[in-house]
Amino acid sequence: MRDLRFKVSGQTIEKETGCDFTGIASGTDNWLNLVFSFDASWAGMAKVVCMRDSNGVETNRVVNGKVAIPSSVTNGKFFSIQIYGKRNGQLVSTNKLFVDQT
């Protein structure tokens, strides 16, 4: 398995410095993991990640800061991710971030 690491601070998600995002092949199924490091503003929130490519959309729960990427969103030249969090009636979302594939 391969981990793709991201930092989430407030409403901003970005690729973690030092994580290699090159050579990601399209068509993988549950082999790529999204691994998130959240700042304190996300404490106590239920979190989901919305993953999209040109052919599909998947929304999965983030458990212990991690989510496996299903094949339904890895068939194109890129996929995007966006995180949503909810706590006590409060809803927050991040920017959309794109990851290129070969």
Image (cartoon, rainbow, N blue to C red):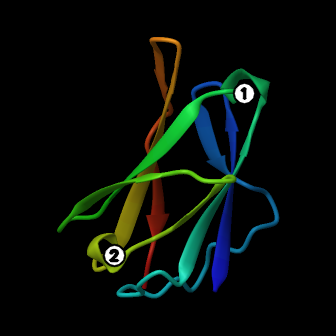
Q: Pointer 1: what residue?
A: 43
Disc 2 marks which residue? 77
On screen, 63 above or below 100? above
The image quarter containing residue 79 is bottom left
- Closer to the camera in the image, 11 or 22: 11
The quarter holding residue 2 reads: bottom right
Residue, x 44% and y 44% (percent of image)? 82
Q: Position of residue 97 (x, y in %)?
A: 48, 49
- Tag 2 secondary structure: loop
Label 2 crowd (10 A; few <14 / some 14-19 / many >=20):
some
Identity, as a three-letter code, of the amino acid under mark 1 = Ala
State the image coordinates of residue 30 (x, y, percent, origin top left).
47, 80
Question: Residue 32, image x and y in percent?
Answer: 55, 78
Three-letter amino acid code at the position of disc 2: Lys
Q: Residue furthest left?
A: 55
| Precedes in sequence: disc 1 or disc 2 | 1
Which residue is rendered at x = 43% and y = 42% of the image? 96
Q: Measuring from the top left, give residue 98's x and y in whole percent.
A: 45, 56
Identify which residue is drawn at 35% across, 87% down.
Answer: 27
Q: Quadrant of the C terminus?
A: bottom left
